[in-house]
Amino acid sequence: MSTTIPHPDFSAERFARAPDARFEPAPADGVLPEGFFSTTNLPTYVRVGGRWRMPREPRMDCALVLDANGELWTREGRRVRQGERVAMGQAEDGSQGVYVHASWLAGGAEGEFKFMTSEVSREKPIDYARMARLLVEERERGGYPVWVTGPALVHSRARADMTWFVANGFVKALLAGNAVAVHDIEASIFGTTLGMSGAGEATSGGHGLHMRAINQVRGAGSIAKAVERGLIQDGIMHACVVHGVPFVLTGSIRDDGPLPDVVTDNLAAQDAMRRHTVKATMAVMIATALHAIATGNMLPSFCTETDGSLRELATICVDSSEFVVSKLKDRGTHQAFGVVTNAQDFLHILRLFVERELASRTASR
Amino acid sequence: MSTTIPHPDFSAERFARAPDARFEPAPADGVLPEGFFSTTNLPTYVRVGGRWRMPREPRMDCALVLDANGELWTREGRRVRQGERVAMGQAEDGSQGVYVHASWLAGGAEGEFKFMTSEVSREKPIDYARMARLLVEERERGGYPVWVTGPALVHSRARADMTWFVANGFVKALLAGNAVAVHDIEASIFGTTLGMSGAGEATSGGHGLHMRAINQVRGAGSIAKAVERGLIQDGIMHACVVHGVPFVLTGSIRDDGPLPDVVTDNLAAQDAMRRHTVKATMAVMIATALHAIATGNMLPSFCTETDGSLRELATICVDSSEFVVSKLKDRGTHQAFGVVTNAQDFLHILRLFVERELASRTASR
Amino acid sequence: MSTTIPHPDFSAERFARAPDARFEPAPADGVLPEGFFSTTNLPTYVRVGGRWRMPREPRMDCALVLDANGELWTREGRRVRQGERVAMGQAEDGSQGVYVHASWLAGGAEGEFKFMTSEVSREKPIDYARMARLLVEERERGGYPVWVTGPALVHSRARADMTWFVANGFVKALLAGNAVAVHDIEASIFGTTLGMSGAGEATSGGHGLHMRAINQVRGAGSIAKAVERGLIQDGIMHACVVHGVPFVLTGSIRDDGPLPDVVTDNLAAQDAMRRHTVKATMAVMIATALHAIATGNMLPSFCTETDGSLRELATICVDSSEFVVSKLKDRGTHQAFGVVTNAQDFLHILRLFVERELASRTASR
Amino acid sequence: MSTTIPHPDFSAERFARAPDARFEPAPADGVLPEGFFSTTNLPTYVRVGGRWRMPREPRMDCALVLDANGELWTREGRRVRQGERVAMGQAEDGSQGVYVHASWLAGGAEGEFKFMTSEVSREKPIDYARMARLLVEERERGGYPVWVTGPALVHSRARADMTWFVANGFVKALLAGNAVAVHDIEASIFGTTLGMSGAGEATSGGHGLHMRAINQVRGAGSIAKAVERGLIQDGIMHACVVHGVPFVLTGSIRDDGPLPDVVTDNLAAQDAMRRHTVKATMAVMIATALHAIATGNMLPSFCTETDGSLRELATICVDSSEFVVSKLKDRGTHQAFGVVTNAQDFLHILRLFVERELASRTASR
């Protein structure tokens, strides 16, 4: 938290060769000359009259001003007066007379001051086009994308979008828990999820509906049989059954019921999941901490092509907060690419981009 | 945290009139008869032989079983054996022989056990169709929707969508801070936001770009003049200038620069904001805690129609977490309707739905 | 989102009887008379000359000013000039001439404008004294407090505090997952948790240590045997074994190992948990979503005293964010009392307060 | 998201020199030999018979098993049978016959698989002892620790602890907003914060109390005068006035009032803050995004000792979620050390540790 920072060795060749910093007058009060040097919060050295000097009052996002007394200041642009001499240049390596001492930061290795270096942040753009392209390419090359989802997908309108992905060949295996199937089936039979209407209102008598849905499937014997009998007529599980997409419903202590298809023993469940993860060429994890981390534990960070070459295993992890993705990385799944958003919105836009990608491929043929 | 709960007064008329609970045999092991009573975690009383009795081992999501010895149990469906007698009915008010004692919960007033009663949750569906309809109706009736936005809108692809809303008459006033305009203009001039590329990568030398953008506008004198001179050629601020949508950029201690248009005194800034909030008929707040709460403080919970009648002032608050909306409500803006998602995705889908709403209105004419 | 609000019926008795509002002059520029009426954002009516009128430009946190032209304004205190007439009183029910129309908010029932009405918020004080008192009382009366914990308790210094609670009779049963025990035992054998030192640094070779800890206990046959053999010499599991506190370690698909004591079948695990929840007189849930919600599902909202009377089952739920508590409530555990903080800090302060409570009881004897 | 990973060059000296991996039989079903190699999810190569081979079904937290057919498998310990041959050793650099290919991860530089590498996480231990030591050392050497706080400190019991730090010389300057002072003074005059009692309940009529507190101080003319007149008799602002600790209250558009001491112009406020940050030798930021980032913008990442040497400027940032610290880092304050907890609990424990540190220093003299 409070280490000593050695000054750079200015006798080194690169510094010896460097020119003095160049200064230009500010064109107006509060306006800097185009091409001004913009400061960082790191130790900074300016070469003036052959000597490397540190400006006073250091801070980021400022200009460097050489005053009439030869004193160097770090100053906000708005406080610079017309005619004051302002340091120029963008190079931070000393080659234009300003050196920003960044190497002590990252253990000596790299060294540039940057914003937005965190790995996962809701403030970063989401590159849907790239994810859509990956999904389409996986389908074309016959890859094995494994989807791992939490119940948020079903609680909301995302159910239709997820069904679309299953029905259209983008999902080779679905790994989920009892709740995903329960609420999907509750929606199919009763039109609610966890007793909540599609508009998000708690309904009267609604708290028992998921129990009634479970009971009906238990009566039928399995999800496939409930589909066969017409009990379940739409939705994600219906699509899996109809399109032959394998699913593994793993149990947890939080489960109601459970549905007859649920693997209640965790070791058997892990084995069932792993039969899919060993084949995975891509993973899409949406709105689930438990299943995402469980799958992350099993997933190599790479997959092997048929020619023996290795490729990073594209792993997309979507959650409402940065926490799940950071946790996934903290548990060793470093390759995870985090998307911080609402699961419902994610799926809707992803589908949109996949449809566009497909349309553009058709068009360009 | 630990209050006493009085038993209901079973001498009351409504209980005296009630029938005994009806029981039916379970059709198979682990399967309940259709129409079974599904339990809650509240004190529950079952009328058997004219007496109101509490079942043992109470919990939610179970069946009520009357065993051979006349003992009543709360039991998970999976543990019920074929032929065991299960209580039937959905009524919780005693009228079918089962009474769920819920009134002590909400201070005696209301009384039904429900799931998903929280006001703001990422697990609730987002009703984009309704919001789109509201926006279109506001435009049609000449309302005054005020938009309040944080910089997340600009950091990402949402910039194009926000520009679209401004250009198409859905925004009557834009309330924001220096950063929104800075990054929007940085994107217009340099193609980055906070030095980050559109794909979310930190760029080399990028940390100074927002300072250079600010400096250029300071040189021009104002955003409008920078648009005029062709310095700013697209984006949100450009659309405001070109379409005559008023904006208030209020300062904060976090600001770099600031841009010449920023109202740096907070009292003057509050007065400038309030000139718009007194006219507001709707508010859309996206990805900003500071500005959302500041605006919430000024905003009445209602607006007055020309005929003198009152209408709740539709207030949509979008944020990545439940926290900002809860805080807004905790600061008195109870009418706020919370949407928990990524700002970029929100705007993209909202635009899609507004376009659909417009298309359907055109079609139906 | 946008409902019509009916005006109150001012012909009602209570309004007919009400006096005109009283106004007093502001003592100085920007200073209001003591006892001024402080506004809300709700529809507000002021009785002036026998008529109920709505002030212009409504907002909260303002004064009501009657200007020289008889116009009523809602105005920020800082904008009020010396001598301007300001409405007085605190009553919002019309009895002092000002009526705040709040009843339409909560479905007609209640009606007062309040801040901080959310149920769970990091901005609320945490009443450790009350929780400490509850725990001590439970121990004195021989209650059955069930603790449900996640691994955050072990990852950090909280391990010593949790051990203290177990060793001192405040825990009648511990419900947790494999990870809690694994990291507690890893800490006992290797001094790390998930390969991280007590100072939070990732250690070299650390990623395998939890696997080695698991393997050693698997070799011993059970946690109790590993304690017996001296393999595990301190910590939470050690305290449970030594003090005869029953624990249920329930499995999940995320588990490594697992330890031999883990109940790997979820239905068997639920049954094992329920053997404790049916006896529970209090529940303390710390830093776990899965186990907290699983336990919440099983827990009645009340417990029955030996004299047959009912008492709300004190349920404390501690988590880093409001989300888990809200989710618990959304899943029906309405009685949960949420504490938003870091698990490590929670336990440390709770122990401090329990020790104080014990000391004060000893002293007062 | 999906890059190609080159195989290592096994003709290199270090690989050529390496021995074959050593295998030992598992001592029992599901138990591995002590010293087994524990896998990662990275490409892994095992030297068998002089050839580097990749085991099948790679994943982390497993053993490597060489079966009777000479096939290499990655297998969960629980699935290993007695007598099966398990790879031994902890070295991952090939020196014991197993090579983990990690260098492609971090751009080629470093290369070890680790857990818990995220910079800020609620799952990391909080080193209060170290922070306490830093604070005490700063006081001893006459440093200039700047504290930056949000209103959460006052909303809760932390008020007494913060007052203690001010009164005891650990705070050289307090940077905060209007709300901190308003609620501190509301607590002093009315015993509530934002109308909420110390137990966190919304009080009747409470919503106006902060306005009444503000109005009284406006009447007095300044906080210092209100202290002088006995209007404010305790709390944080009282301690600042009485102990001569300078404070800067900077305005924001969210402010009610504001108090007469608030610097309402943001540029003047930045200048006032900077007069303290240029002297700072340490920064403690608690429960504020706006002020933390504003201060972070102004703060160098280092401070200069009297002998001209540089030291990293210890910057502690406390918040309920990882977000603020990540944002601070994303805005360039890379040196920030994040503590994820509740502000109230943080201050209480920090004070405890500072008191212990002081006691231990006294004792050791």
Image (cartoon, coloured by chain):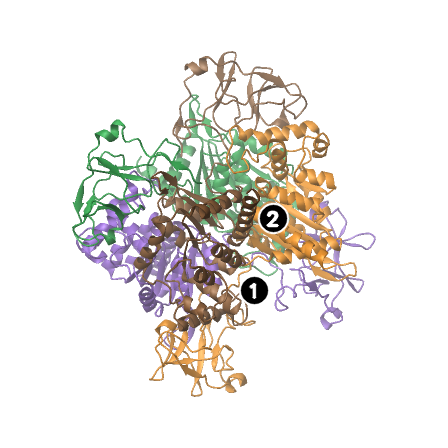
Chain colours: A brown, B orange, C purple, D green
Report x, y in % for residue B206: 54, 30
Residue A201 image label: 1
Question: For mark 2, what is the residue?
Answer: B347
Is residue D252 visible to us here? no
Q: Say which of A192 and B66 sits in front.
A: A192
Viewed as shown, does residue A260 lie left or right of D185? left
Viewed as shown, does residue A159 lie left or right of C4? left
Vertical order, C78 against C173 (above or below): above
Q: Amino acid at mark 1?
A: Glu
Vertical order, B21 against A344 (above or below): below
The residue lying at 49 percent from left, 65 percent from top is A194
Q: Amino acid at mark 2?
A: Leu
Report x, y in % for residue D139: 43, 34
Q: Say which of A115 and A186 sits in front.
A: A186
Question: Of discs 2 and 1, which sits in the foreground?
Answer: 2
Report x, y in % for residue D110: 35, 32
The residue lying at 21 percent from left, 50 percent from top is C216
Is residue D307 visible to us here? yes
Structural distance between the alpha carbons of marks 2 and 1: 23 Å
- Give me the chain letter of mark 1: A
Report x, y in % for residue B49: 42, 88
- Give me the chain letter of mark 2: B
Q: Say which of D43 and C222 sits in front.
A: D43
Mark 2 surroundings: few (<14), some (14-19) or many (≥20) residues within 10 A: many
Residue C82 image label: none
Respond whether the residues carrying marks 2 and 1 are from the same subunit.
Answer: no
Viewed as shown, does residue A82 lie left or right of D28? right
Vertical order, C50 against B230 (above or below): below
Q: Quadrant of residue C222?
A: bottom left
